[in-house]
Amino acid sequence: GSGSNGVGVGMVPAVSRSAVSRGVVVRRPGFVEGLGEHRAKAERMFSLMDGFLKNDPISLQKDILHHVEYTVARSRFSFDDFEAYQEVVIGRVSWLRDRDVWHIVDQCAEALNQLGFEFEVVAEQEGDAALGNGGLARFSACQMDSLATLDYPAWGYGLRYEYGLFRQIIVDGFQHEQPDYWLNFGNPWEIARIHVTYEVKFYGTVEEVEMNGDKQKIWIPGETVEAVAYDNPIPGYGTRNTINLRLWAAKPSSKFDLEAYNTGDYINSVVNRQRAETISNVLYPDDRSHQGKELRLKQQYFFVSASLQDIMRRFKEEHTNFDELPEKVALHLNDTHPSLSIAEVMRMLVDEEHLSWKKAWDIVCKIFSITTHTMVAEGLEKIPVDLLGSLLPRHLEILYEINHHFMEELKERIGLDYSRLSQMSIVEEGAVKSIRMANLSIVCSHTVNGVSKLHLETLKTKTFKDFYGLWPEKFQCKTNGVTQRRWIVVSNPSLRDLISKWLGTEAWIRDADILSGLRDHVDNADFHLEWKMVKKVNKMRLAEYIEAMSGVKVSLDAMFDVQVKRIHEYKRQLLNIFGIIHRYNCLKNMDKDSRRKVVPRVCIIGGKAAPGYEMAKKIIKLCHAVAEKINNDTDIGDLLKLVFIPDYNVSVAELVIPGADLSQHLSTAGNEASGTGNMKFLMNGCLLLATEDGSTVEIVEEIGADNLFLFGAKVDEVAELRENGVSNLAPLQNASPLKVPLQFSRVLRMVRDGYFGHKDYFKSLCDSVEAANDYYLLGTDFMSYLEAQAAADKTFVNQEKWTRMSILSVAGSWRFSSDRTIQDYAESTWKINPCRCPL
Ligand code: OAK
């Protein structure tokens, strides 16, 4: 946490503010029971801890000093803020000692202040653990927070990347990527479990051997690396339940290849061994393109193999009969990235535990469930067979066998419909023969979840239509959510206090439903006054940051209008920029009198482009080029400013979201599976300007269409619009089709003609939205977009109405807490109950 971006965040683990990727694994409650002796010991330790490990400021100071002297031996040297941060974390948040970490923040602040440190400055020392790309990964972090808080016995697994998502720096308006070596000074939250290691194997051959009269396949691997566990505690709020995010790091295997060392090439042998570490080195920064890279596949299998060995080890410590596995273990695949798990569990059960294929398959089909996080079929992961066969030869055989059984079953059910058989097959024939990871996951999972109602509908009627026809009962909706602990309590402390004051309770921090009680005060003038004050404080914080980052001074009276998310064509940052250019044109053409009535705007855009994504990088450059023109036009002054916030990440989000008046969610309908940014802004009383896409549809259901600014084609109009350019459907008829091209083409022409410079560079960007190529319908939606913007301006002038809408947004955000999402998963997908530790 950091002082500048949130008071009181220091005691929250790095991982819960981070974006973590990959799978979430849930264990059923029975698993933790019956530990007998262990439990007795733990209880005794707990009771002693209560006596010894006190959380009052004096005890905390003793601890800090103890660490200074005995852990880092720094008492005689300078002991700076960074070390203070590390010591507080190491000393206090070791999860065995700590029971309700959220409630010792104030004591820590006092202890540090008395030692002469400023708590906020110490807390600011913590950086983001950027272990994921965007929405998918940050959603995992919210889920972990909710799992812990709701007392579920869950484990999260992932990779301990040494380089997280790249740092974005902007040079002359262009994005440059810099490595994020986040572990440089250590990570005080993690606990290295140097004894929890597993061998992970790659390459080699498959041989058939005779075993007890039966033929048995065995895999003779060619390379072995070691996976070492690093544990990251995720403490729940208002509970002793602290769950574990176990991240794997690759290390050279401890087994020596005597042969290699004896050939005399000692140096090269060591260098080769060291190469193992590259597996977990770096996170792939392109969140959607699957390029069939060997290292990426290695990462996936490394992660899957280590996690499953860990899970099986714990199961086997207590159980001998694999029939009990589905009772004790639920494995949830967070998108298809860990779906090699299916083949791996089959391999473990059949090749290592010698279960029959049928029995193993029966078990496997009861333990897996999956959530998919993408709308478009092209986004689904495929692995080329050649690559898989060389890296994991036995797994490829298993996948073929799974497919063979599936195809047989399918033929029985649908007959010899070859077109459907080939579409549903796990193996895709074609120029590059591949394994379809989504098909594999659906075949084997008992539940397939979508992340919003609209997403599920698309899965059922388009993406996985045939599978839905076969197994309708598998498909479920689990609308995403975000944690109010991160997105209000930590990042917006002023709003937190105001909400608690007016609700007369802090219980909403654990039970978001209570937030709906804010509706009772929606017309209270005093409440309105305090509400506006909170927004002002947050806008000041943001304005200071903007000035420090970009040198642009912004007026607090302006509407702060924000679009922050990964840069993607479908998210239409370009529509936003075109709208800004149009606004600029309008201002330039206005007389003085009209200008006086204009609502001043500060447009804020932030987000990273995948390093190889040309169009996205051009959008960033265009944003800077337009900003340069507008911000330096003295004629325009405070009426319009455009700032690009570099290196958008979770820390920046914590600062930007509370300070926003308006936020934009512009994806072409049918492209955003859910979106979670919309929920974070909603929770912070920021009004949405959005298309009816993903979870926004459900936000509209909850708060009503008059409490946000909707625009654009609806999902069922998009196909027709793409086909014919203009809509025949009713809602769009009002927006004159002629007017659309006129306003839009003027803006487009300015960019094309080099009004913002870099004419040649922007050409392909302009081509991508020119009439026939306008796949994401920028031209079609432009008028409707401008109307929504005008409605936002008009409302902003009426501050009472605006404040009402803002309060109703926060009140309606109760439904978008990840606690609701997780409870739904627990009850209807994993079938688990909470395990509450005695407080
Ligand atoms: C990234 C790579 C592959 C598949 C999906 C993603 C991804 O980031 N998906 C996002 O997941 C979020 C959490 O469910 C959703 O809110 C976003 O709409 C979706 O784009």
Image (cartoon, rainbow, N blue to C red):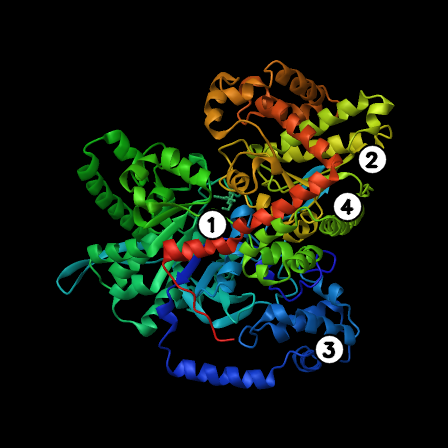
Q: Marks 2 and 1: in contact by CB < 8 Å?
A: no
What secondary structure is marked by label 3? loop
Question: Which residue corresponds to mark 4?
Answer: 546
Question: Which residue corresponds to mark 1?
Answer: 295
Question: Which residue corresponds to mark 2?
Answer: 638
What is the tally of numbered marks visible in this picture? 4
Of marks 1 and 2, which one's residue comes earlier in the chain? 1
Of marks 4 and 3, which one's residue comes earlier in the chain? 3
Mark 3 or mark 2, which is nearer to you? 2
Q: Marks 4 and 2: in contact by CB < 8 Å?
A: no
> Which quarter of the figure has residue 575?
top right
- Give me the C-alpha separation between circle 1 and circle 2: 50 Å
Residue 282 x/y as whole percent: 55, 53
Residue at image location 70% in from the left, 78% down from the top:
57
Up/down of 416 relative to 366, above or below? above
Mark 1 or mark 3, which is nearer to you? 3
